[in-house]
Amino acid sequence: MTRTDVHRPSAINTADYSFVAFECIRVDGLEACQIQLDNRARIRSHMERTGGSYSTHAHGGNCMVCGNANAIYTALFHHEPSNTYVRMGSECTEKVDMQLDRVAFHKFKDGIYQWREAQAGKRKAEAALAERGLSGAWAIFTATATVGEPFEERTTRDIVGKFCRYGSISEKQFAFLGRLLRQIDERSQTQERRSAEQAAATPIPDAMLQGRVVIRGEVVSFKTVDSPFGRSRKMLIKHQDGWKVWGTAPSSLVAEKGDTVAFVASIERSREDVKFGFFSRPSLINQGAERPSNF
């Protein structure tokens, strides 16, 4: 069939065409791809303004100039004389000397590719988590994040996000996700238990506020903190009577969460909570520390 339409390669007058947007002909799931949605929005807006529509000339393929059926990524141009829109593959835009931003075209194609890769990563992550009984982690990842989201949900979302992005996570991360999900399931009971412990705790004794004293208790947590003076390792200690103190761990302390430790330090009681305080100038007892009166 001999073509006689104005969009055949030999008849194109580049001055009559203006670029509108990019398109990806594959539509499998791309209705959720943001870069595709943005370009489609530009097309709709342009068509609403001109009242034009896609050209209906016979061309036999995705590229409406040469008829190439394999032109997946195309650029859409508006033909002002006929008020029609014509889709062109990248090769045809070069042959007909169209003024097209090649960098933007490659960015569009890369955006589609990256989105497809992300979807494949999500499918892999969802299946792997379900296989290990961790579907709850996927549910948290796909749910809308809230302001002030708890550590467990925030961390779960981060790990699953990295799984989707990089295609795998370590066995330790799988195990950590399991612990996080258990903590979420047991959160209400944990909060009730902590509230009961707090109610039963006694205030920090006045005797513990007199100079340097021996602090003996369980390590509740450790945290590394950065400041203008450098990095330090903080720890929270719970005394057997329930009161707690927070401060910088002795530099040579070797301990883990749950261990019982003893060291010498000064304590200042919190103004807001008589059952909580801050310790300072800590030193281990077995490293030549002075022997306070309560030793």
Image: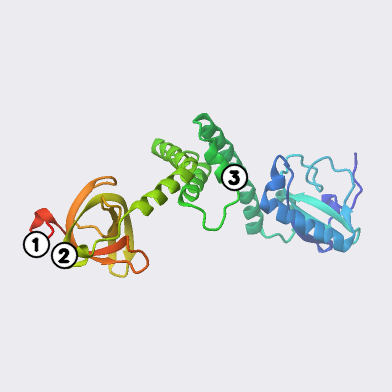
Q: Nearer the viewer, mark 1 or mark 3?
A: 1
The residue depicted at 54 percent of the width and 38 percent of the height is 136
Viewer-nearest residue: 266 or 242? 242
Nearer the N terminus, badge 1 or badge 3? Answer: 3
Q: Are marks 2 and 1 in contact (CB under 8 Å)?
A: yes
Q: Position of residue 137 (x, y in %)?
A: 52, 40
Q: CA distance from mark 1 to mark 3?
A: 56 Å
Report the residue marked by disc 2: 212
Q: Residue at x 55, y 40 (%)?
A: 138
Q: Amino acid at mark 2?
A: Arg
Q: CA distance from mark 2 to mark 1?
A: 9 Å
Residue 254 in view in this figure:
no
Residue 227 in sight here: yes
Disc 1 target residue: 290
| Point 54% across, 32% down: residue | 130
Q: Could you tell me which quadrant the C terminus lies in?
A: bottom left
Q: Are marks 2 and 3 in contact (CB under 8 Å)?
A: no
Where disc 3 sits, the SS reads helix
Three-letter code, disc 3: Thr
Give the residue type that dot 1 points to. Answer: Glu
Residue 142's disc is: 3
| Residue under the point 72% across and 52% down | 37
Decide if residue 51 is on the left or right side of residue 221.
right
Q: Residues within 10 Å of mark 3 (few under 14, many from 20)?
A: few
